[in-house]
Image: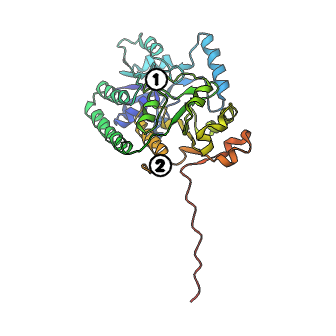
Amino acid sequence: MRICSLLPSGTEILFALGLQDQIIGVTDLCDYPPQAADIRVVCRSRIDPSVMSSEEVEAEMHRILSNGESPYDLDVDWLQAAAPDLVITQDLCYFCEIDAGTVQKAVEPIPAPPTVLNLNPRTLDEILDSFLEVGASCGVPDRARRLVSDMKARIDTVARGVDRVPSRPAVFSIEGVNPLVIGGHWVTDLLLRAGGRLPQRFAPGCPAERIPWDDVVAAQPDKLYIDLCSSDLARSVREIPWLAAQPGWSDLPAVRSGEVYLIDHSTLSRPGPRVVDGLELLAQLTHPDLFHGHIPPNAVLKLDPEPASSNLDLIGNAFKPWPAAPVAAAPVAVANR
């Protein structure tokens, strides 16, 4: 098959199914695995959050949509000439990737239009189902079933560990700041499966909706996870001062105890094969006494409450890599004999 993936998670699924040689086009956000960089980019975002603040992204997105434009530039001429057999896209969030309606319109003139597979999972189980959808559409259903079986085994391992916890800490996930956005969809599902406790209104599959800061204060989280969508750790550090300036920040239980974590977005924001990595990571952060070895290097920063309390303008400097690197033991002096 000739496959065009206009969805980063779709690209990751295709690689996990061993179909990378059949991918002929991707987006500029398809950056994992690293080999995806060798595939032709046919869709680019008009907004680069790596160099823009959340406020700037919001303003630019509003400008683009108000003008009736798309936040993405799709190479329609290439798509029609390439005539792929399958195009993978989504309709879950217009911030994240080009929408299925735009893609469907672009491929209509092709004499034998490709199948447009629209993936919109909202929970962990639906993510696993989407792997089966891709496998069936690409003619490799057995591979997809094996992938899902392997992931379910890891999910079950987390579930067995969580069953042993004596209590669940109150957790909260923030996916966007200024405006403030709750970590919704599958993220709420992961938080609960990882052994956390959420306000009842944030059930698995709930929208990643905008919320007032008062919702965070009312939740009184014991652990606060800041996993900003489309943000690496460096950008998340730059956004932290806005949160720290909100009334009641310093009184949150998570802030007082230093249980505030910045999490690299790719671990949680993509409904692809790495979503189980995200579940295991959250399980370790939520119950570090039960889960170990699930946090890769450069994926998490943890708040040190002592320096954070001295100067909120410099609060980004109070976040340190987690788990902390072990301190090297001092050399032991050996007497000459």
In the picture of the structure, the residue carrying the numbered disc 2 is 288
Where in the figure is residue 20, as x and y percent of width and height? Answer: 38, 34
Location of residue 249 by image quarter:
top right
Between 325 and 67, the residue placed more toward the observer is 325
* Residue depicted at x 43% and y 39%: 195
Where in the figure is residue 4, as x and y percent of width and height? Answer: 42, 25
* Residue depicted at x 38% and y 29%: 127
Placement of the C terminus among the 4 image quadrants: bottom right
Placement of the N terminus among the 4 image quadrants: top left
Label 1 secondary element? loop
Between 11 and 249, the residue placed more toward the observer is 249
In the picture of the structure, the residue carrying the numbered disc 1 is 206
Three-letter code for the amino acid on which mark 1 is drawn: Cys
Mark 2: few/some/many CA within 10 Å (<14, 14-19, 20+): few
* Residue depicted at x 56% and y 37%: 224
From what the image shows, is residue 300 above or below residue 45? below
Question: For the view shown, which residue lies furthest in the left direction?
Answer: 142
Left/right placement of residue 202 relative to residue 124 reads right
Label 2 secondary element? loop
Between 26 and 135, the residue placed more toward the observer is 135
Question: For the view shown, which residue lies furthest in the bottom direction?
Answer: 337
Between 277 and 195, the residue placed more toward the observer is 195
Whole-Å distance between the Cαs marked 1 and 2? Answer: 27 Å
Which circle marks residue 263 in the picture? none
Q: Are marks 1 and 2 in contact (CB under 8 Å)?
A: no
From what the image shows, is residue 61 above or below residue 258? above
Q: Earlier in the sequence, mark 1 or mark 2?
A: 1
* Residue depicted at x 60% and y 70%: 330
Location of residue 60 by image quarter:
top right
Three-letter code for the amino acid on which mark 2 is drawn: Pro
